[in-house]
Image (tube, rainbow, N blue to C red):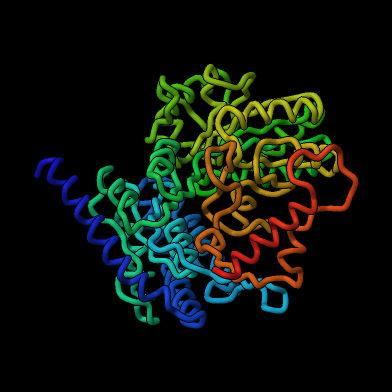
Amino acid sequence: MTQSDKDLRSIQEARDIVEQTHQAQQIWANATQQQVDRVCEAMAQAAFIGAERLGRMAAEETGFGVPEHKKLKNEFGSRYIWESIKDVKTVGIIKGDKARGIIEVAWPMGVVAALIPSTNPTSTAMNKVLISVKARNGIVVAPHPSAVNCSNATAKIMSDAAEDAGAPRGLIGCLTQISLEGTQELMAHRHTALILATGGTEMVRVAHSQGKPAYGVGPGNVPVYVDRSADLEKAARYIVGSKAFDHSVICATEQAVVADRPIAGRLKQLMQGEGAFFVDEVQADALRKTLFHPDGGMNVATVGKSPQYLAGLAGIHVPGQARILVASLAKVGRDEPLSREKLTTVLGWYEVNGWRAGCDRCIELIQFGGRGHSLIIHATDEKPIMAFGLEKPVFRIGVNTMGTLGMIGMTTKIMPSLTLGPGGIGGAITGDNVTVHHLYNIKRIAYETSRPPEEAFRPSTAPVGPVYGPSPGEIEAIVREVVREVLKA
């Protein structure tokens, strides 16, 4: 079979699945809140039960991360996400009443095209299916080519559970013939109403170029500033644990420590006690050449790998107990590859003198590759905490928490999600953690207020400067005439 044949089959599959999902969604749009919640709860439960198996499948198929950690992410993407949205009204009147003069009504988008990353291929699929169906949409999952089987298995578990609970057949679809042409056909199809894209910069750019509403979320280059006022034991434990979690494939994971100089030595010792191995300059240079191609692109073979695996690729030796590798760096930008986002167990290390210098360094890192995404600060002094919160060009600032778990909303009160918007400065239409509220429109039934139209248009009696044009009396006469004509019509 030629590549052309595969592309054509992929395009045809996309068309067929979107058509089927569209027909099912037309039925689902009439579901009651009780029916919606029953179906979503069944899907969440089925996915939660399958969390371990699907996590193992994801790790084996992609070669990324840690199966046990993927299980935890799957539990988050299923039961935890459901708990966060289960009480949200998504059918009929969701807010307001006639006495207040306005009624808000939820209205589904239609068919959602959900592009899934290889780094989190099962948990992200769970998350997107739940929030889409809860908003009475249909959804077509588009897996990454290297994660087709595990994403398909996830979609099937949830689809079967949905149908058993009363959802129309075909409401949840999933592509199996994966090609760029097929995914583009899915996004461009006339029945696709919304694109929900999680992945690399180029994929998100393509999603935004379709002329359709799109939530695109891309890379983060998350700095973690550790202030002299921080609880250093906690900071060391959290930074190492967060970076090591699932071998650092969540986009909110810390990418570089920015340590306040007076506490840098002690923080380094504590991190070493938690399993951080600080490489020397020769080892760091070997990692630069191994992790990144000359054009700055990351070597996929290094994504989501253990320190020992990376050491083998780089031809260096690291201890068997090392959980992460840390490289001391002096600059940020193209001349320092390790200042980029690293979706693997390598962390940058900078030292600065004071939180103002820490601010500057963090902004450099964010501007280089994480605009709008996330930042972590460890401190007890509120002054640097508020300065970081107010000044940094990101939409999630985690305080004394893990980047990995805090920014997805597991250990903070940010809305739980595995799709993290970087806002306008990051090339997206929202800086929110994308959830069910982003997947329905709101109709507004607006009653006339007690103020009559003539009064609404009556000119102000406040003193003003010279008036050019009709006098206040003439304006009022015009308004009365317009109102009469409108009422006559």
**Camera-side residue of 295 and 444:** 444
Residue 286 in percent (x, y) is at 47, 21
- Asked whether residue 84 appears in the rendered view, the answer is no
Q: Quadrant of the N terminus?
A: top left
Can you say whether 313 is above or below 421 in the image? above
**Camera-side residue of 351 and 99:** 99
Can you say whether 315 is above or below 474 in the image? above
The residue sitting at the right extreme is 463
Q: Residue at horizontal 50%, vertical 55%? A: 69
**Camera-side residue of 349 and 19:** 19
Q: Quadrant of the C terminus?
A: bottom right
Residue 7 in percent (x, y) is at 19, 45
Q: Residue at horizontal 71%, vertical 65%? A: 453
**Camera-side residue of 55 and 420:** 420
- Asked whether residue 87 appears in the rendered view, the answer is yes
87 left or right, relative to 170: right
Residue 117 in percent (x, y) is at 41, 48
Quadrant in the picture for residue 332: top right
The residue sitting at the left extreme is 1
Q: Residue at horizontal 45%, vertical 37%? A: 201
462 left or right, relative to 75: right
321 left or right, relative to 300: right
Q: Residue at horizontal 31%, vertical 66%? A: 21
Total labels: the figure holds: 0
Residue 335 in percent (x, y) is at 53, 16
